[in-house]
């Protein structure tokens, strides 16, 4: 297993406000506030792949009915997600499942480091939410044609596949299957900028995820608490 | 304005592939290729605010019927759009209107420089498409609370309006319906990250834009 203390991808770090409009902190603050009011059964955490999902119909159709909260922030690395989770975004909530999707923005880190960062995040989640199941989504391929980032993301996924089973509550889900065509290309109909998913792209990956979530939620014994509004 | 200092916002500059997957150039090449195949009446050009518009229902609802093409690239500043338009994206097409929405990503540039960048784009469009009109959309406010970028963007809008007031081929449209509330805040229901529009945000921006475009298309082109 990777040495987390030495792994830069596992060091919690907020995003610096380089532009001057404080948007990252505003979003984090909003999520912390949402934790005070909401009682989600499912929590989505990650980068823009998570964040954008909420802007498409698929969210309302498949995930809102599961009482899901979306704590995605565009551009986030594993370091940023770790920091957010340690600084209020897990307070007062007890989701049954956490969906974690992060890693594609870790440009400064090796595949092994990125996987280590994702693992560290999953470990943090299981320690703070001992009864929750953690679903870690594999990184998607990116770029119009084969390129080093595709190889890197695939390598990250390879590490996740072998490391995650050691965390009893966590499991790995590959949602990348249909995106690379036989000629090696990714089409704009699936990823409008060869990174971010279109409505069509989200539909393709949301279905297996939604099926898994329904399965997990069905298996989880209901914990009685004050009636949901 | 000093003639000696080149304006970085008005200097055509391609985006460097720092990440390693060549996505910016892939998109540019796609657009050049689209220019060869398609015959748009309206061309949208700019940054992610243009690009994302294409992803939501609003595009098919309001702009596809106008035979519009979308050449938006997330992250683009004026110098990137300037490079793209100077390197093939305007070749082989003759739209009646070019809608230009760019400027919010020009970090490190002054409002004056950003205005200069926008004006440089207007000039390139005029050179390549002498019969087209350019409709410049105002840069939107951003950030949850008042901040320097809001001031910068408002100044850009003011300067651009002044600069094009004498140009017959260019006009300006303020598409901000009032995103900033009386307490100075922008809602995440309109901008999910206080920069990018939600489908609801696009609805309030695009309806007046669509009406304005239709009236432009219905009028004969001016010389």
Image (cartoon, grey):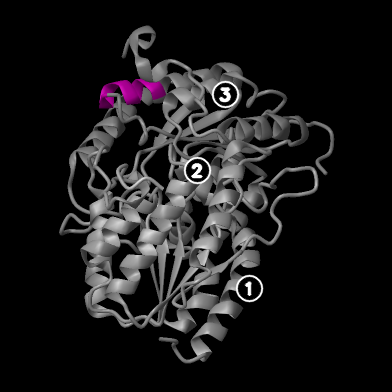
Which residue occupies the extreme top position in the image? Answer: A5
- Residue B183 shows up from this direction: yes
Secondary structure beneath disc 2? helix
> Does the segment drawn in magenta span residue A41?
no
Q: Residues within 10 Å of mark 1 (few under 14, many from 20)?
A: some
Q: Which residue does the image show at 45% across and 56% down from the upper left?
A: B102
Q: Which residue is mark 3?
A: A85
Q: Is residue B37 left or right of residue A134?
A: left
Label 1 or label 3, whichever lies nearer to me, is: 1
B196 vs B88, nearest the viewer? B88
Residue at horizontal 50 percent and vertical 46 percent from the top: B111
Label 1 vs label 2: CA separation? 31 Å
Could you say which is closer to the camera, residue B80 or residue A177?
B80
Foreground mark, 1 or 2, reads 1
Q: Quadrant of residue A132?
A: top right
Q: Residue furthest left?
A: A183
Q: CA distance from mark 1 to mark 3?
A: 41 Å
| Circle 2/circle 3 CB separation < 8 Å | no
Lower sequence index among marks 2 and 3: 2
The residue identified by callout 1 is: B208
**Magenta span:** A110-117
């Amino acid at each position: 297993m990777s040495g987390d203390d030495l792994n830069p991808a596992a060091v919690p770090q907020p995003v610096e406000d380089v532009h001057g409009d404080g948007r990252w902190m505003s979003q984090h603050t909003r999520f912390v506030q949402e934790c005070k009011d909401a009682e989600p059964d499912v929590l989505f955490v990650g980068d823009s792949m998570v964040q954008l999902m909420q802007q498409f119909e698929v969210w309302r159709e498949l995930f809102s009915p599961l009482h899901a909260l979306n704590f995605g922030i565009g551009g986030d690395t594993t370091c940023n997600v770790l920091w957010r989770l340690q600084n209020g975004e897990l307070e007062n909530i007890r989701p049954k499942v956490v969906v974690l999707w992060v890693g594609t923005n870790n440009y400064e880190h090796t595949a092994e480091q990125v996987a280590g960062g994702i693992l560290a995040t999953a470990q943090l989640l299981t320690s703070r939410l001992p009864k929750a199941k953690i679903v870690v989504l594999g990184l998607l391929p990116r770029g119009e044609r084969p390129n080093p980032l595709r190889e890197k993301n695939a390598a990250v996924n390879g590490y996740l596949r072998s490391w995650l089973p050691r965390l009893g509550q966590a499991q790995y889900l590959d949602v990348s299957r249909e995106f690379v065509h036989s000629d090696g290309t990714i089409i704009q109909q699936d990823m409008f900028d060869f990174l971010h998913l279109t409505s069509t792209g989200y539909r393709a990956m949301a279905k297996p995820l939604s099926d898994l979530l329904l399965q997990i939620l069905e298996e989880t014994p209901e914990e009685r608490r004050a009636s949901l509004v | 304005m000093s003639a000696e200092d080149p304006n970085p916002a008005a200097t055509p500059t391609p985006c460097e592939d720092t990440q390693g997957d060549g996505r910016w150039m892939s998109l540019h090449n796609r657009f050049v290729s689209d220019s060869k195949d398609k015959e748009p009446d309206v061309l949208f050009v700019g940054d992610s605010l243009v690009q994302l518009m294409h992803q939501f229902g609003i595009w098919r609802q309001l702009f596809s019927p106008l035979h519009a093409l979308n050449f938006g690239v997330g992250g683009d500043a004026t110098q990137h759009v300037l490079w793209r338009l100077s390197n093939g994206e305007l070749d082989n097409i003759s739209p009646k209107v070019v809608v230009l929405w760019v400027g919010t990503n020009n970090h490190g540039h002054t409002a004056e420089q950003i205005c200069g960048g926008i004006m440089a784009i207007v000039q390139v469009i005029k050179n390549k498409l002498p019969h087209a009109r350019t409709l410049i959309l105002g840069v939107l406010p951003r950030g949850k609370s008042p901040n320097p970028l809001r001031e910068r963007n408002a100044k850009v809008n003011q300067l651009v309006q002044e600069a094009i007031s004498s140009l017959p081929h260019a006009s300006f449209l303020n598409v901000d319906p009032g995103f900033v509330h009386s307490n100075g805040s922008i809602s995440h229901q309109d901008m999910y990250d206080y920069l990018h529009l939600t489908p609801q945000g696009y609805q309030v921006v695009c309806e007046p834009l669509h009406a304005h475009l239709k009236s432009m298309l219905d009028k004969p082109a001016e010389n």
